[in-house]
């Protein structure tokens, strides 16, 4: 069974870039039937879709974040990453990585999440 | 794209059934049979309970079921148990390889 684990800084300054990594264990990210994405949740609020990357390397982003987001995959390391630029305090959230079976638009597997605070 | 609309809270008694609604538009719920539901306990990652409107992942109790009518999807939980008390989120494909979530519903088991 595939498992995901997020890693990255817990505190980032405004205007800087957030870089998070999701490490996948229990299978290959390139040969599995999943596509790999990121979802976030501000404290006390609901879930927000950020984007995902397919096996082909094609990326798709939420329209509201598209101008600031880059998702990349590193298949040899079984990792994929999230870069979010020009941070503001509104980007403070729990960030989850997830895997969704292609064609279902549903995230079947999730990491435990990593909390990111944006503050000077 | 606006978030899908869910009631902020619902409640039901032990053993009873409840339904949580998720209202979208013809651009999302009304067009695509790609509605999913997630259960999230405090401090935990969301757990997929229903996908493609009605399908249950392996290991999810058959007390959980999904349906859709027009622009509104629904999650029904039958035989309420204390462990069901938590937050639930709906999610829909909206085209262009994007999904949107509902605002979440807090379920209280009386």
Image (tube, coloured by chain):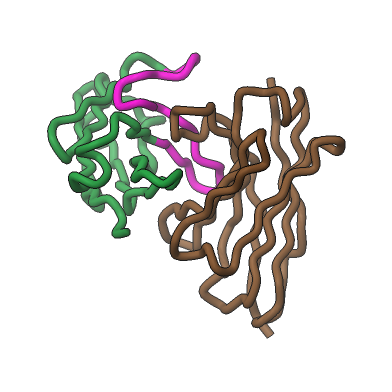
Chain colours: A brown, B green
Depicted A99 relative to depicted B66: above or below: below
Quarter of the view holding residue B33: top left
Task: Give the residue at x 72% y 56%.
Answer: A20
Answer whether residue A63 is magenta in the image.
no
Task: Give the residue at x 30% y 21%.
Answer: B54
Residue B110 at what x, y percent from top left?
24, 37
Q: Residue furthest left?
A: B70
Depicted A116 relative to depicted B63: above or below: below
Image-based side of A71 in relation to B74, left or right: right
Magenta stretch: dominant secondary structure: loop
Residue interval drawn in magenta: B38-60
Residue A53 at what x, y percent from top left?
62, 43
Quarter of the view holding residue B31: top left
Task: Give the residue at x 52% y 28%.
Answer: A102
Total marks shown come to 0
For this rendering, which residue is in front, A97 or A114? A97
Answer whether residue B39 is magenta in the image.
yes
Residue B17 at what x, y percent from top left?
20, 25
Depicted B26 relative to depicted A119: above or below: above
**In the rendered image, which quarter contains the N terminus of chain A?**
top right
């Amino acid at each position: 069974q595939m498992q995901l684990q997020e890693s990255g800084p817990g505190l980032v300054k405004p205007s800087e870039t957030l870089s998070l990594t999701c490490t996948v264990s229990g299978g290959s990210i390139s040969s599995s039937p999943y596509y790999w994405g990121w979802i976030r949740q501000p404290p006390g609020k609901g879930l927000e879709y950020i984007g995902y990357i397919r096996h082909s390397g094609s990326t798709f982003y939420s329209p509201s974040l598209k101008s600031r987001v880059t998702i990349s995959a590193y298949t040899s390391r079984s990792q994929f990453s999230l870069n979010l630029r020009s941070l503001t305090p509104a980007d403070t959230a729990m960030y989850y990585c997830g895997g969704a079976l292609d064609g279902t638009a549903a995230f079947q597997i999730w990491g435990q999440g990593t909390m990111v605070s944006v503050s000077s | 794209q606006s978030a899908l609309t869910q009631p902020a809270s619902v409640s039901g008694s032990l053993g009873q059934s409840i339904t949580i609604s998720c209202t979208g538009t013809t651009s999302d719920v009304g067009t695509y049979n790609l509605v999913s539901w997630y259960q999230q306990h405090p401090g935990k990652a969301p757990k997929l309970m229903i996908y493609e409107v009605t399908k249950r992942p392996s290991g999810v109790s058959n007390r959980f079921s999904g349906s859709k009518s027009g622009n509104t999807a629904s999650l029904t939980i039958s035989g309420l148990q204390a462990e069901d008390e938590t937050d639930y989120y709906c999610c829909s494909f909206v085209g262009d390889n994007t999904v949107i979530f509902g605002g979440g519903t807090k379920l209280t088991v009386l």
